[in-house]
Image (spheres, helix red, strand yellow):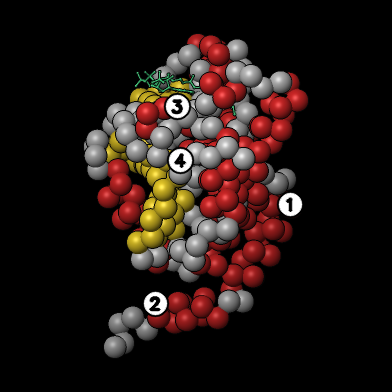
């Protein structure tokens, strides 16, 4: 196993874990070591209620590490892509909601990584692109599945064919991000959101991130069945009754 500097820094702040991609000299390009660190963290996160993911430097992520990729064989690429799929599934379907803060380049695999998070905050400098066609490769980090669901297959196709870049404001308009904030304001804003998320019942948050996207992929009847089953499971938690009683009694004390 080659030795390498830590690629992802972790800091715990109360109920929030702050993760930072920390390879700014390479614009936080995703090499195997970075993806492995992300996978390890999200597969077994610390006992926190929300995660904020940002990146050091002026760019969120320049996507796949092309220097590492250039020598991969066809067989290596299948295994490599599967590794990304597993790592990013661990983010999307993990127990803990994740808020991404983006600035500068959010391109290729960087956009795929962002699309696996649950709430996306873009600073005004952020731009979004899928230059795979220009590099002679294809999406490999789940973008065909996740980014198409976010902004539509037609837009992804057009971005990939023409090399189009979407600005932060445009990305909000098409549904790729939830918020646009001023440059430098992303981390504080994401912490505010993370604290709101952390104040929810953890069992509801887990269902929101794990059940909702799966139900949305189901056919009508199966989706409604899964929804009422999930609703019943949530209601069976004692904490639900406590939280509802707190609301109903809020004016009495
Ligand atoms: C990299 C990478 C990278 C930068 N892999 N090393 N992604 C791309 O096609 C995007 C390629 N990167 C860029 O377009 C630009 O670097 C940026 C717009 C992100 C930033 O530009 P800039 O002028 O600030 O930086 P730079 O001078 O281009 O790069 C700084 C260093 O980072 C330089 O290394 P140095 O040793 O010469 O200093 C670059 O080589 C290095 N660098 N990006 C490796 N991506 C699972 S499938 C996913 C498919 C994809 O993600 S395709 C998209 C790949």
User: Which label lies toward us, 3 or 1?
Assistant: 3
User: Spatial distance from mark 1 to mark 2, Cα to Cα?
Assistant: 33 Å
User: Which label lies toward us, 1 or 4?
Assistant: 4
Q: Residues within 10 Å of mark 2 (few under 14, many from 20)?
A: few
- Label 2 residue SS: helix
Judged left or right of residue 73, residue 13 is left
**Where is residue 13 shown, x and y percent of the image?**
35, 61
- Quarter residue 173 falls in: top left
Judged left or right of residue 84, residue 48 is left
Q: Which residue is mark 3?
A: 62
Residue occupying the point 60% across, 18% down: 70
Front one among 231 and 32: 32
15 vs 4: above or below:
below
Can residue 32 be seen by looking at this rendering?
A: yes
**Where is residue 215 shown, x and y percent of the image?**
65, 51
Q: Which residue is mark 4?
A: 5
User: Spatial distance from mark 1 to mark 4, Cα to Cα?
Assistant: 50 Å
Q: Residues within 10 Å of mark 1 (few under 14, many from 20)?
A: few
Q: How many marks?
A: 4
Residue occupying the point 57% across, 24% down: 68
Q: Quadrant of ligand 1?
A: top left
Quadrant placement of the C terminus: bottom left
Mark 3 beta carbon near ligand 1 (under 8 Å): yes
80 vs 6: above or below:
above
Q: Residues within 10 Å of mark 3 (few under 14, many from 20)?
A: many
Q: Which residue is mark 1?
A: 221
Q: Which residue is mark 2?
A: 247
Q: Are marks 2 and 4 in contact (CB under 8 Å)?
A: no
User: Which label lies toward us, 3 or 4?
Assistant: 4
- Label 1 residue SS: helix
């Amino acid at each position: 196993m080659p030795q390498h500097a830590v690629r992802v820094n972790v800091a715990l702040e109360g109920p929030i874990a702050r993760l930072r991609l920390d390879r700014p000299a390479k614009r936080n390009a995703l090499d195997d070591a970075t993806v492995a660190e992300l996978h390890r963290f999200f597969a077994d996160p610390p006992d926190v209620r929300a995660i904020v993911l940002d990146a050091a430097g002026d760019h969120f992520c320049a996507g796949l590490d092309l220097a590492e990729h250039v020598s991969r064989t066809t067989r290596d690429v299948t295994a490599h892509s599967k590794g990304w799929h597993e790592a990013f599934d661990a983010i999307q379907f993990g127990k803990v909601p994740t808020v991404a803060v983006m600035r500068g380049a959010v391109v290729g695999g960087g956009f795929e990584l962002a699309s696996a998070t649950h709430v996306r905050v873009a600073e005004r400098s952020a731009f979004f692109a899928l230059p795979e066609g220009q590099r002679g490769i294809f999406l490999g980090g789940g973008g065909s599945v996740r980014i198409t669901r976010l902004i539509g297959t037609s837009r992804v196709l057009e971005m990939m064919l023409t090399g189009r870049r979407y600005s932060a404001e445009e990305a909000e308009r098409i549904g790729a991000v939830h918020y646009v904030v001023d440059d430098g304001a992303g981390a504080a804003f994401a912490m505010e959101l993370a604290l709101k998320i952390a104040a929810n019942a953890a069992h509801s948050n887990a269902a929101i991130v794990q059940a909702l996207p799966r139900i949305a992929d189901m056919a009508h009847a199966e989706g409604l069945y899964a929804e009422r089953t999930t609703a019943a499971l949530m209601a069976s938690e004692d904490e639900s009754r406590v939280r509802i009683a707190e609301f109903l009694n809020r004016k009495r004390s």
